[in-house]
Every structure is written in C-alpha cells, then in structure tokens.
C-alpha cells in the first residue's frame, strides 16, 4: 500500500514517519508540506520522497492509495472529507473530528465511499497500557473497580491554543480512548476542566474526567500542561489486588530523542527493568515486566485491513465514543452535572465485543 503523509510538523515527523518506515506492507509515497522550512526538512529527512504543497496536488499525482492526516486539528475534517471523496483510505490523527456531529459525518462519508477510515490512537500501544491489558485478561487483578490514569506535562508552550485546540482534544483524546478500550463503553460521565483566557481564545488547560463503564469499573483520567509538573502514572484497583506503574512510554521518549524503530527492530519498545510496574496482592508485591510494544504495528495492521477489506486497528466508528466523551466534558464542566451518554454510540450492550466495533 502506498501512503501519503499530510503534514510534517512535530507529529508527522516524530510520531508518524518513523513508524510508517518500519511497518510492513506500506510505502511512504509522498508528503504534503507548505512552508519553505518544512519542505526543506522533508527533502533532508526523506530523500527521493515526493513533496507536495497541498493535498489536491498529491491526489492529482496519483501515487497514493491512502493518506495520513496529521495537520492542526481544525483542518482534519475538510482534509479527511477531501481524501475520502477521492476514494482514498484515511488515517486521521487524534482528535479526528472537532465534534461528535463532524465525526459522524466522516464515518458516514467513508461508509458511502467504501474506504477504510481509522484514527491514529498510538497510545493504546504504550507499554504500560498493553501490560495492564494482559494483567486484566489473565485475571491477576480480579474485577477492576477503579483506575486513575494521569499524564501531566510541564509544557505550557506546547499547549494548542484557542477553542479548536486545548488539552481535552490533545491529551484527553489519548486518555479517554485508553479507558474505553480497556474497560468498555461508558454509561455516565462527569468532568472538571480548567481553562485559560488566552489571546487566541478560551483554552482548556487541564482536566479530570470520570467515566462509569458498562462493566462496573470507574476510571479517572487527568492531565495538565500548565502546572510545572511532569508525571505519568497509572493506578488500578481490583478485587484481587492493585497495579501501579509510573513513567512516560519508552517509544515516545525514544522517538522524541530521534531514534527510529527501523534501526533496532528487535529491541524497540522494550522498557528497562527500572520502569516496570508493581502488582500488589494478598501474598505480597512483585515487579511486572513491561510487555514490548511497537507503534509501527498500527500501520502494518492498517495496510492489511486495506488489502483484505477489514475495518483496521482503530475504526473511526469506534472512536465516536471518545469524541462524544470529549464533547460531554465541556458540558459537564460548565454545569457541574453528571452526563448520561448516548447508549447507541457507547454500545452499552454487554454482549457486543466493543473492541471490534
């Protein structure tokens, strides 16, 4: 499958290109970049890869089967619709749509055209999350009762400002997706959201989101970029014990440091022993080796889905639930009330395998 990358900012360069290059069944066939500096960077980083100044020119060149859209969030909807209308399969960076209505519009457009539409939720593949998923699957924790999912950054300069940005769409997209993926749809919800009145407009700068899941678990996801603290921690409480893990994901750290999975594929995504979490049960405490993971697998699975006509690793219709929660967060924060979520979107029928929706 030949893939075009739309956008070559921090996300496109650090969190997409290296993982596209390391994936199986996929070729980077072109990049859309607009500024002179970005075009020069693409030429330096990716010699021989065609560069286009807009999506229309990439489409007209006819060399792509699919595109990844990793431009600023406000541009995701029109670019995704443009690509879908041309019959291209689409991967959209999170948040894949600004509102639930827009997200549903994208899903409907992709269904009508018969193309695969997925959302790049790479943080499902963080080592702490895949390790926790295995503990749950193996029954080590028993019935999960409560989880605290925290991701704080001392990065006020990196806060996407204005009403189309904010931390809910940035980090909230990841944390909410992780909780819905692990524990199933949410049946109710409330939130506290902090905001900053900036020249670009009112911007959400911190949040706590409380979800009550269909399986009875309650999750609390929180993040900030403005309180001068770097902290990543997951705490899970279950009927048989508790699991605690701290520290940012090794893949994110190494990608930001300029390392690439293609350079060391056998060791990529392996946490050091010092980063392992701990399982606390009746007969004591033990360290839990972090499972190895690789963001590149998303792209390998997407290419396979296009080839065989399946739904892909993170179908956009599955991500409707995440977008609904982010929409509801603003409502709950504004009126201080618990919000009941749409049972159709959230798929509260427990007989449904919600991970495959």
Image (cartoon, rainbow, N blue to C red):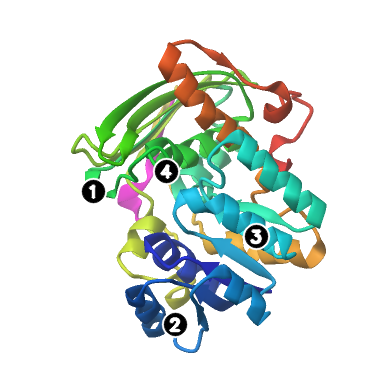
Pointer 4: what residue? 170
Q: Are marks 3 and 2 in contact (CB under 8 Å)?
A: no
Compared to residue 218, the image places residue 14 above or below, namely: below
Tell me which label, 3 or 2, sits earlier in the chain.
2
Pointer 3: what residue? 82
Q: Which mark is residue 57?
A: none
Pointer 1: what residue? 157
Q: Residue at x 58, y 58 (%)?
A: 79
Does 9 sit left or right of 76 as displayed? left
Front of the two marks 1 and 3:
3
Q: Residue at x 55, y 15 (%)?
A: 339
Cα–Cα gap, marks 3 and 2: 25 Å
Tell me which label, 4 or 2, sits earlier in the chain.
2
Cα–Cα gap, marks 4 and 1: 14 Å
Pointer 2: what residue? 46
SS class, disc 1? helix
Cα–Cα gap, marks 1 and 3: 31 Å
Question: Which region of the structure is painted magenta?
Answer: 271-281
Q: Residue at x 37, y 28 (%)?
A: 207
Cα–Cα gap, marks 3 and 4: 23 Å
Compared to residue 2, the image places residue 123 above or below, namely: above
Front of the two marks 2 and 1:
1
């Amino acid at each position: 499958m030949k893939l075009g990358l739309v956008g070559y900012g921090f996300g496109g360069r650090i969190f997409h290109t290296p993982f596209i290059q390391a994936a199986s069944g996929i070729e980077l066939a072109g990049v859309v970049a607009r500024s002179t500096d970005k075009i020069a960077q693409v030429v330096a980083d990716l010699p021989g890869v065609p560069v286009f100044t807009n999506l229309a020119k990439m489409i007209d060149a006819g060399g792509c089967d699919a595109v990844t859209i990793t431009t600023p969030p406000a541009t995701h909807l029109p670019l995704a619709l443009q690509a879908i209308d041309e019959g291209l399969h689409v991967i959209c960076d999170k948040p894949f749509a600004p509102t639930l209505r827009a997200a549903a519009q994208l899903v409907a457009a992709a269904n009508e055209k018969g193309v695969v539409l997925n959302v790049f939720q790479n943080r499902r593949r963080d080592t702490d999350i895949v390790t926790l998923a295995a503990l749950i699957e193996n029954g080590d924790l028993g019935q999960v009762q409560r989880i605290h999912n925290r991701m704080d950054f001392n990065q006020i300069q990196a806060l996407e400002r204005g009403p189309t940005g904010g931390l809910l769409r940035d980090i909230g997209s990841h944390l909410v997706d992780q909780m819905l993926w692990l524990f199933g749809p949410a049946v109710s919800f409330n939130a506290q959201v902090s905001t900053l009145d900036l020249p670009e407009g009112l911007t959400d700068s911190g949040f706590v989101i409380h979800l009550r899941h269909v399986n009875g678990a309650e999750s609390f996801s929180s993040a900030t970029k403005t309180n001068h603290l770097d902290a990543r921690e997951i705490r899970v409480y279950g009927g048989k014990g508790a699991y605690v893990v701290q520290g940012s994901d090794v893949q994110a750290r190494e990608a930001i440091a300029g390392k690439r999975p293609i350079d060391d594929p056998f060791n990529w995504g392996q946490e050091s022993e010092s980063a392992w979490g701990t399982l606390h049960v009746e007969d004591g405490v033990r360290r839990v080796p972090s499972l190895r993971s690789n963001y590149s697998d998303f792209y390998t699975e997407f290419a396979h889905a296009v080839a065989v006509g399946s739904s892909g690793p993170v179908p956009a219709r599955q991500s409707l639930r995440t977008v609904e929660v982010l929409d509801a967060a603003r409502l709950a924060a504004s009126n201080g009330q618990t919000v009941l979520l749409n049972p159709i979107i959230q798929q509260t029928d427990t007989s449904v395998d919600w991970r495959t929706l």
